[in-house]
């Protein structure tokens, strides 16, 4: 495959093998992506597919194929000199909110003679939920009710098929088309059976191959097909003709009619396409950089919109994803917010408060997340799985929000708690719970209980201090960040995330003291989790937690107590310090890195076993990030990671070494082929967090090498075979997988913006603390970044005339729109929020930082 490179506008172009690239966003559940064809019947023996696969491979090889694409649009061009035709197919989803995809097709005669042909657009229609792709495929086809519209085919299935409870269907699926003169198709083939024939298929339909017309037939209850055959036409030399194909979903015929009217001409389509490109260009520029590496700069623009796509579509909106049913998980709620906070934190406040309504009083959380705000659903299937890391992420996101906005008051906003039949962190099922009681925690008097946001994050982290296994580390439960560690529910422990819970207890103490509140009010039941006990005693900690769980099993009293902020902070710091000391003392291995886990046999997972070294990146990232690892240990981890996890061939870091055998006492991950998914892939989320942790701890050059390894692998498209983006991981062959699913994009933007360029909030003020290495100034003395802060668009330029490295430079000068700022000859500069708010809101504010 030829490589692809973003140009100055973030667009990409490629050559002959471009059609192998994965497509960008599509309207989901509407059509099969396998076969999207625009057929041309030239004469009895000559059939050409503009976008599909010809049965005549020799003819296919004569096609010249090229791809041009930009943010959420693509254009494929195929030229066949033998047939004398060129087909240009532009695809995009309008940014103006209509639930439709537009395919704009231009056919051009590239020969020296006139060519007559019959064009046919063919779009398979699915028209139902994803579950029935395998189960009840034929049964659900019987629900299809097809209507032959003037411009195409509309299907409105009678029911939304669900054996748990069928529902009447209100959605109408359509494939419509017209030519540039707004002429409708001459014939319609509304079913796949009619279009393909008994001996044909979607790649070689008999109706096209044999030039047969549709016959009157009962087409209800069949697999629907949007096959539109237009009138025979003739093109002179260099002459072109356009067709518009609209594929979409609507709840009404009026909505479909409005879509037809809006895109009824080539001019209207061109205007919509221009607005769509402008829309995504603006979104991609909310955070952008300018360095001498234009490939990196433009790649970053694609990455910057990934958090937006996640917010719109959830986890699984592309057909190549094998990731459940497409809903958002608990971890996704918080990590997706990171990127949104950095671009515009104001709308995120309500989202954060809403999300906390999913926390249970036992410190765990709901796992089924609805569409509406505050909608967390009870699990009627009794699937009792708890991810032990889920308590970590909300506080990290909340801390970022507070620093970016200065909004400390959010800590004292109130929210309800989630309640269902799962109690004791889902180890016990409460038989007294009735679904009719709702999913809000109530007091014994029947009132919905609400606690502060601070109380919610406190419980998520404080309960985990007591929730320990045989080695006094936090229990692994159903899994942690690594979903593949799912077979150590009873006795597994996560040393990695024990580090982060220690970090969070310390962070909670600092946040509380910063608010200036002298005391806080908490639920009465939480009181027994404070106070000094023997932290070395596993039994005492487990018993303390069980007593607490028994008190909140069916509800809370509704009574509250107050505790002095200083006393609470002191208690949290003591617990944090104990955890950190315990990990340092017990989990540092002689091989020069931390043990990550204990399995269900209570055995240490990390270390050397004969010639086999078991090391995970996760187990090193969080001790570094949390502060558990001191500088000497970090240096040792860097050496070990380079020796055992770094792949010289691909230039990236693997998630773990090859453990050899399957690990049935730890998780399914190690039953996967090594080098894929959670078993040793180049898992970008953890690699990004590795870079973030190194930057956070002052290892700048090392952090940049780790961070830059990702975009280098992504842009090596001969191996990655993806559009510019940050995929979930690269597999054993270097191919990018799960292209837009990953939460890695939010963490990448967070790391680049707040750590590499060091442009971030501190209690609402703007802190500029650049951590740029001399390597980044190799070919220039000026690099810059754009972002929004305090509602102001900022461009911050860093001038390094001597191209000094991070450890050698300080901030020696600074200006804001040519006005000199006072500097203290230090590593950082603080610009007050008040100063920024005094600038015009609609102007690009220029800040210049001189390093010397």
Image (cartoon, rainbow, N blue to C red):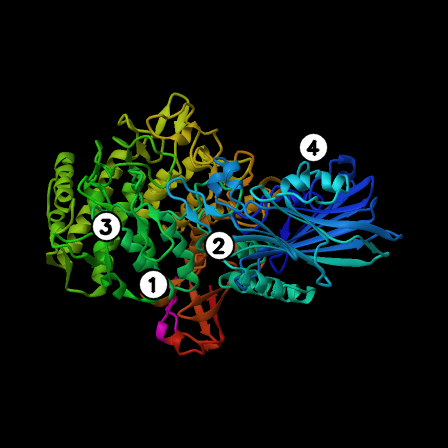
Residue 789 quadrant: bottom left
N-term mark: 3 or 2:
2
Q: Which one is in front in this view, the residue at disc 3 or the one at disc 4? A: 4
SS under mark 4: loop
Give the spatial CA distance, label 1 vs label 3. Answer: 23 Å
Q: Which residue is drawn at 74% across and 51% down?
A: 87
N-term mark: 3 or 4:
4
- Identify residue for label 1: 349
- Identify residue for label 4: 199
- Identify residue for label 3: 505
Residues at marks 4 and 2 touching, judged by CB atoms closer than 8 Å: no
Q: Which one is in front in this view, the residue at disc 4 or the one at disc 2? A: 4
Res 309 label: 2
Give neighbour class at mark 3: few <14, some 14-19, many 20+ (Cα, 10 Å): many
Give the spatial CA distance, label 3 vs label 4. Answer: 67 Å
Give the spatial CA distance, label 1 vs label 4. Answer: 58 Å
Q: In this view, does 211 lie to the left or right of 834?
A: right
Q: Give the range drawn in magenta.
A: 822-834
Q: Which one is in front in this view, the residue at disc 1 or the one at disc 4? A: 4
Horizontal and vertical percent for residue 717?
Answer: 61, 44
């Amino acid at each position: 495959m030829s490589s692809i490179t973003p140009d100055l506008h973030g667009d990409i172009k490629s050559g002959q093998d471009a059609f192998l690239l994965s497509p960008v966003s599509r309207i989901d559940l509407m059509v099969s992506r396998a076969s999207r064809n625009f057929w041309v019947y030239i004469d009895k023996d000559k059939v050409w597919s503009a976008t599909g696969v010809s049965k005549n491979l020799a003819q296919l090889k004569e096609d010249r194929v090229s791809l041009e694409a930009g943010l959420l649009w693509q254009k494929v061009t195929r030229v066949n000199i033998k047939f004398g035709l060129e087909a240009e197919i532009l695809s995009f989803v309008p940014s103006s909110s209509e639930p439709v995809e537009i395919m704009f097709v231009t056919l051009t005669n590239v020969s020296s003679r006139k060519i007559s042909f019959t064009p046919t657009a063919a779009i398979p229609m699915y028209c139902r939920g994803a579950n029935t792709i395998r189960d009840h495929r034929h049964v659900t086809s019987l629900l299809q009710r097809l209507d032959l519209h003037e411009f195409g085919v509309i299907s409105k299935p009678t029911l939304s098929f669900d054996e748990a409870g069928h529902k009447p269907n209100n959605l109408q699926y359509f494939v419509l088309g017209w030519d540039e003169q707004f002429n409708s198709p001459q014939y319609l083939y509304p079913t796949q059976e009619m279009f393909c024939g008994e001996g044909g298929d979607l790649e070689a339909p008999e109706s096209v191959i044999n030039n047969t017309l549709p016959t009157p037939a009962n087409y209800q209850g069949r697999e629907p097909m949007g096959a539109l055959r237009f009138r025979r036409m003739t093109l002179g030399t260099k002459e072109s003709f356009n067709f518009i194909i609209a594929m979409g979903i609507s709840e009404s015929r009026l909505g479909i009619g409005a879509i037809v009217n809006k895109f009824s001409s080539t001019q209207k389509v061109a205007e919509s396409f221009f607005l769509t490109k402008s829309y995504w260009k603006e979104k991609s520029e909310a955070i952008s950089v300018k360095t001498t590496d234009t490939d990196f700069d433009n790649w970053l623009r694609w990455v910057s919109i990934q958090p937006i796509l996640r917010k719109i579509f959830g986890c699984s909106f592309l057909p190549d994803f094998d990731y459940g049913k497409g809903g958002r998980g608990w971890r996704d709620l918080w990590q997706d917010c990171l990127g949104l906070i950095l671009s515009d934190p104001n709308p995120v406040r309500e989202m954060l408060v809403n999300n906390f309504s999913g926390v249970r009083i036992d410190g765990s959380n709901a796992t089924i997340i609805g569409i509406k705000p505050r909608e967390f659903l009870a699990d009627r299937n009794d699937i009792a799985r708890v991810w032990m890391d889920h308590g970590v992420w909300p506080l990290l996101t909340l801390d970022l929000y507070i620093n970016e906005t200065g909004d400390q008051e959010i800590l004292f906003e109130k929210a309800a708690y989630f309640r269902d039949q799962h109690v004791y962190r889902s180890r016990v099922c409460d038989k007294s719970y009735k679904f009719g009681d709702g999913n809000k925690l109530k007091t014994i008097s029947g009132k919905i209980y609400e606690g502060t946001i601070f109380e919610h994050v406190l419980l998520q982290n404080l309960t985990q201090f007591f929730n320990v296994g045989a080695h006094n580390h936090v229990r692994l439960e159903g899994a942690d960040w690594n979903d593949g560690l799912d077979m150590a529910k009873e006795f597994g422990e996560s040393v990695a995330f024990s580090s982060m819970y220690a970090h969070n207890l310390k962070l909670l103490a600092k946040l509380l003291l910063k608010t200036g509140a002298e005391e806080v009010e908490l639920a009465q039941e939480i009181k027994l989790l404070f106070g000094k006990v023997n932290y070395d005693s596993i039994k005492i900690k487990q018993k303390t937690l069980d007593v607490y769980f028994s008190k909140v099993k069916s509800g809370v009293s509704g009574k509250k107590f107050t505790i002095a902020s200083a006393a609470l902070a002191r208690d949290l710091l003591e617990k944090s310090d104990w955890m950190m000391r315990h990990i340092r003392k017990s989990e540092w291995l002689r091989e020069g890195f931390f043990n990550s886990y204990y399995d269900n046999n209570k055995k240490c997972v990390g270390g050397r076993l004969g010639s086999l070294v078991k090391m995970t990146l996760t187990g090193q990232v969080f001790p570094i990030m949390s502060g558990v690892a001191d500088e000497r240990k970090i240096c040792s981890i860097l050496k070990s990671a380079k020796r055992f996890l770094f792949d010289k061939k691909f230039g990236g870091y693997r998630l773990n070494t090859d453990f050899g055998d399957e690990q049935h006492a730890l998780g399914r991950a190690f039953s996967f082929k090594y080098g894929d998914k959670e078993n040793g892939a180049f898992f970008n989320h953890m690699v990004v967090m590795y870079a973030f942790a190194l930057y956070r701890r002052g290892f700048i050059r090392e952090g940049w090498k780790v961070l830059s390894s990702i975009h280098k692998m992504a842009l090596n498209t001969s191996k990655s075979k993806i559009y510019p983006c940050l995929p979930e991981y690269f597999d054993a062959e270097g191919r990018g997988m799960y292209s837009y699913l990953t939460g890695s994009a939010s963490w990448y933007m967070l790391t680049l913006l707040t750590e590499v360029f060091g442009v971030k909030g501190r209690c609402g003020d703007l802190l500029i603390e650049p951590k740029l290495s001399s390597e980044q100034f190799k070919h220039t003395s000026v690099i810059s970044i754009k972002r929004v802060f305090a509602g102001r668009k900022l461009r911050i330029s860093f001038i390094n005339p001597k191209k000094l490295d991070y450890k050698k430079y300080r901030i020696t000068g600074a200006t804001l729109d040519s006005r000199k700022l006072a500097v203290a000859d230090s590593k950082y500069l603080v610009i007050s929020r008040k100063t920024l708010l005094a600038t015009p809101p609609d102007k690009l504010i220029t800040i210049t930082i001189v390093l010397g």
